[in-house]
Each structure stands twice: as structure tokens, then as C-alpha cells.
Image: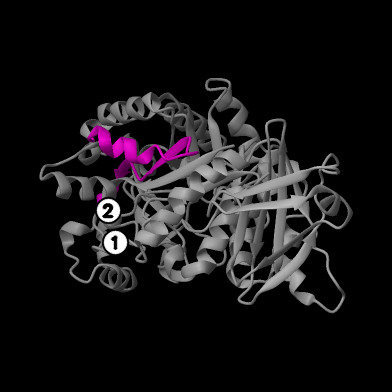
Amino acid sequence: MTVLYEINTLVWLGDLSHRHGRPVTLGDVPGEAWDSVALPGVDTVWLMGVWQRSPAGREIALRDPGLRASFREALPDVTGADIAGSPYCVRDYVVDARLGGPAGLAAARAQLRARGLRLILDHVPNHVAPDHPWLTVHPDRLVRGTADDLARAPADFIEAGAGIYARGRDPYFPPWPDVVQLNAFSEALREATVATLVSIGDQADGVRCDMAMLLMNDIVERIWGERAGTPPAEDFWSYVIPRVRARHPGLLFVAEAYWDREQALQQQGFDHCYDKRLYDRLLHEDADSVRAHLGADPAHQRALVRFLENHDEPRAAATLPGDRGRAAAVAVATLPGATLWHEGQFEGRRVRPPVFLTRRPEEPVDEPLRDFYERLLPAAASVRRGDWRPLTPAGPPDDHTRHHLLAWTWTHAEARHLVVVNHSDRPAGARLPLPWEDLRGRVCRATDLLTGAVYDRDGDELTDSGLFVSLAAWGCHVLQW
């Protein structure tokens, strides 16, 4: 199963440059740095933010009081040299020269491949920079406006290139000030998107599509109405993905997706879609809510991306501190589907730098947390094989603590595993009915892959009554049988 490791490329290279006392680009990253990325179970590295960033977008960001405040909050000694502009305000899909250009990316891909790792890169299908060439030579690929629109709503429109265009937007928030909206109904844009993704597929093994649901027909029509024109018969991704795969059959497509659009995007061709619902439930809801979410069709779940943080979310060490974060990490690491880890997560970084920045503050390493992840990652890699099955904890009617437990098994011809997580701040216990029917008449031994603890249990009791588990607040087991 896919395990992604996201790296903020510009910040990571800056850290390496500082550590080695010389400028480090993708083409000359020291071998030990690539070795440190080849973590147990990780099979795919996402180099976030490699494309040319927009000078015009950077200037807009520098004038934005809210953005400037966020830069100072994350990096109190921030200077103009630390602000590169947004990697999602793309000037062109060519690797930034500061990162080593196309040759540097090719060298990085070779280093990753030598370690058995795939490479994925970003694609931003919804919008482009205000100085992107299309605004001058291909205005038919964008959502256009008029002088009256600009006078009436200057925050919603921008004059650039060959005319006036709508700023890119998500319908639930104000427009992004530094980008221009693409028109997903435009046949010319669809063809250009195919060409862009084919080019990315020439350089990488996969693509992470930013805000993928914004290109779906019904959403485009709801946001843009007549400005976008007549909805095509075929949805955007249903048109684009098969044509890209005709050139790159194995290209991995990952969708950043919200608003319960995951299943529809899977049907339109995506291999994996963000599981934001699980993230929200682990942060804000109880175990019953999480358990209900995990009751979805297993095929659907295998196409989800489980995560506790990424460049858009707060750092997990800040939102899920201590044992609570460890319990949540065990859950996302051992569920079916793809897993997304974020560089710095294992060391306990708490500051999430805005993606505009080239530098982040120094933070101490949380050694106990790093030790925990050094045990969790290989454990998860060994667990997620074979058939996955969620369990329903059982117990006396007057013992409601069983509702706090989340549990599932993985059954493979070579191994059996049981994962139990107490998703609460109080002790919890329950009986867990195991799905294995050949336990009777033997002693069964379980080893916790996180602690090394060994438990011997009578197979007859396990068959008749289930396994009794008692866990402290936010406790967990990853048991190999």
C-alpha cells in the first residue's frame, strides 16, 4: 500500500545548505540525506513546490497584511529574502532554477529510484499565476471578467495579461489574491492540462492534484455559472486522466479532495483521495464517530489517503500532543489505504511555516516521539498485508468504556495482526471477537510491536469469549500473533 512522505522542497534544501555550509540543490543532495528519506514502509516521496513560482504573485503576497502577519508568526525574524512566493501560484511547470532545474530533478528522481522510492509532484489545475503566459496567449483557458466586474468587485477580479480575469477561488472563502481562475469547461484548457500532466509524467511517477474537486462540473457550474459557459458532457477528470494514462499508464494520481467528493473522484480516475473526514474525526470527535467512518466499503477505503498533518494542516505535535498523537498515528498508520507523513512530523515540529517561506525556525527534536515513530513505521509496514477487518468491541451493558476502543485485524497467510486504540482520555476495556477460527486447543502468543511486550492467551477462551483488552487513556496495541 502506498506510503507517502511529503517534503517542503525549498525549506528542506535550505536546511541542508545551512547544515553543509554550501548551496544544496536537488542535483547534489548528499546521499545520507536521501537515505534518511527512505524510511521503513515509505515507497513514495512527494517533493512539494518544485515548479517556477511567480514574481507577480510574490509581490501581491508581500502587500497582503494577513499573509505578512502569518509569515512573522511562523518566523519572527523573517526578511524579504525568506519569502519566495507560493508554490501554488505557478508561473510555469518547469523546475525552479534555485532548486537545480530539470537536471536537478532528474538527478533526485534517480537517487530516489535507487532506493526503491517513487517520486510525485504537484499539479495545480484550478488556477495559475497572474503572469502565466496563458493570460496573454491563451485567454480562452481562463474565466474572464469585464471592466464593470473589476470596478464592482476588485477583490474578485484582476487586470493582467490580455484582459480582466476572475481570481482563483474556493466557494467557501474569499478569492486567493495571487492567482487567476482557469475554466474547467474550456476544451482548450482540458487539452492543455493533458499536455501539462504528460510532461509531469515524463519527470515523475505520480502527481498530487491540488483542490481536485474544484474542477468537477457541478462545482464549476455552481461557482461560475454563465462565466464558465455550457457544462461539457464529460467531467474534467474523466476527460483528462485516461488521456494522460494513454502516455503514462502507471502514473499515480492523488487528489486533494474535500466536501465528501472522494468517491466521485475515485470513479473519475484517481488512485487516492485525501481522507479529511478521518482527520477531522480523530481531532474533534469520539471513537463511535471514527468507527462509523471506518464502516465504509473496503475498496473505497483502500483509495483514501490517511494523514495527521500536511503543509495545509497544523503540525500534529501542536494539535495532537503526547499520547493522543501517538494513538492517532497508530490508527492512520495501520488502516487500509495510503498513508501520508510530513517531513518534520516524526521529530515533533510544532510550527507550520507558510508555503511562501524558504526558511523555518529552529526547533528542538522530540526524541521520545522520534523513537516512537522509529518503532511505528516498520510495525505498520509489517501489519498492512492481507485482509483487513474492523472489530466491534463487546462488554457488559453497564461498561460503556468499550465504546472508546477502535480495533481491527489484518490476516495474511504469513502473519496475523491486531491493532487496538483507545481513542479517549480515560481507561477503557472490552472483549474483541477475533476472526480467526483455528485458535482452539492451543496457546496463542501475541507480541506488541511497539513495546516488545509478550502475551500468552488460551485459544479456547479467545474463540469462545474473545480477547480481553484493557488500555490506559490514549493507549494502543499493535499485536503480532
Sort mark 1 into few (<14), some (14-19) or many (20+) by Cα contacts within 10 Å: some
Observer-nearest of 102 and 110:
110
Q: Position of residue 148 (x, y in %)?
A: 45, 65
Query: Which residue lies at the image location 42% right of the left edge and 24% below the top edge?
Result: 202
Q: Residue at x 56, y 25 (%)?
A: 250
- Residue 30 part of the magenta segment: yes
| Spatial separation of the CA atoms under disc 2 and disc 1 | 6 Å
Q: Which residue is mark 2?
A: 56
Say if residue 320 shows up in the picture.
no
| Residue 156 spot, x, y in % from top left | 45, 64
Q: Which residues are magenta?
A: 29-55
Which residue is denoted by mark 1 in the rendering? 60
Give residue 104's position: percent from left, percent from top. Answer: 26, 30
Q: Secondary structure at mark 2?
A: helix
Q: Dot 2 surroundings within 10 Å: few (below 14), some, or many (20 or more)?
A: some
Instruction: Confirm whether the magenta stretch covers residue 424.
Output: no
Asked whether, in this view, residue 25 is left or right of residue 407, the answer is: left
Number of marks in picture: 2
- Please tell me which residue lies in front, 3 or 266: 3
Amino acid identity at mark 2: Ala
- Report whether 292 appears left or right of 464: left
Q: Is 296 rendered above or below residue 194?
A: below
Between 140 and 368, the one nearer to me in the picture: 368
Q: Residue furthest left?
A: 21
Of 42 and 408, the residue lying toward us: 408
Q: Residue at x 74, y 52 (%)?
A: 457
